[in-house]
Image (cartoon, rainbow, N blue to C red):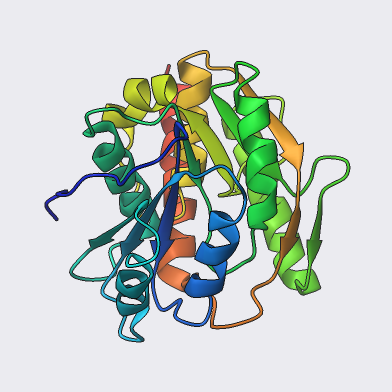
Amino acid sequence: MKLKGTVGKSSSKAAIVLPTYCEAENIESLVCTIENLGINPALLVLDDSSPDGTGNIVTRLRESYENIVLLSRPQKAGLGTAITDGFRFLLSQPSPPDYIITMDADYSHNPRDIPRLLHQAKEGYDVVVGSRYRRGGKVEGWSLTRVIISRIANKIAAKLVALRINDFTSGFRCYSKKYVQKVLPNLHSQTYEIQIETLRQAHIQNAKVTEIPITFTSRKKGKSKLTINEILSFSLYTLKATIKKRAY
């Protein structure tokens, strides 16, 4: 995918990256909520040619909001590549944003928590994680099985990445421009393992990382995009990283 285009006018030095695939039921409401936060961020939507018309809805929204940029990818290519494509695009701008926020487009992450992430990042942190497992955070609408799987994944990640945080797999984050510029060449994840890889790089680079409590709500509309192949990719990444870590 060629990363073309420019970010629209924005008084804020923040950008929000929204990877989408079949989010027609959520995207308009989410965008409108973000637009009403009063932070006027650049809003970058990376849509993997959603067959439900998600991209068409974003195109229509651009008529009302000039801070929206739509990058259409030819096919579903994975969360990891969407995030790194988003990073590359934003850093290629004449005036890259000072802060880049990543989040899900299905309302599992409350957009009203975005100002809290930004506030913490402006205190000098390179990565701020919206944490389900820090005191004050919680998960709503998950089955017991999914909670157990998530907890196990975080225990494994904690062993792999020696950072003093509680939620290694949350995708609701704020990154500093300085951090993204430094680690982008080292990010190679295709799917959900991007969440571990970015924190592992933070540890390697001695970056300042913190977390704030959030409430994660299971999507109300649409179907989950997490597939067996993506779970296997995540598991394979953690295995390879563990072996590499022991080799040093």
Q: Position of residue 33 (x, y in %)?
A: 60, 62
Name the outermost residue toward the right. Answer: 136
Name the outermost residue toward the bottom. Answer: 52
Q: Quadrant of residue 116?
A: top right
Q: Position of residue 49 (x, y in %)?
A: 26, 74
Q: Is residue 80 left or right of residue 71?
A: right
Q: In the image, is residue 172 above or below residue 24?
A: above
What residue is shown at x 33% (from left), y 64% (from top)? 62
What residue is shown at x 50% (from left), y 63% (from top)? 31
What residue is shown at x 41% (from left), y 25% (from top)? 177
- Quarter in which the C terminus is drawn: top left
Q: In this orientation, which residue lies closer to the viewer: 39 or 228?
A: 39
Q: In the image, is residue 104 above or below residue 200?
A: below
What residue is shown at x 76% (from left), y 49% (from top)? 214
- Quarter in which the N terminus is drawn: bottom left
Q: In this orientation, which residue lies closer to the viewer: 148 or 188?
A: 188
Q: Is residue 167 left or right of residue 179?
A: right
Tag count in the figure? 0
Q: Position of residue 103 (x, y in %)?
A: 53, 53
Q: Is residue 46 left or right of residue 2?
A: right
Name the outermost residue toward the front. Answer: 64
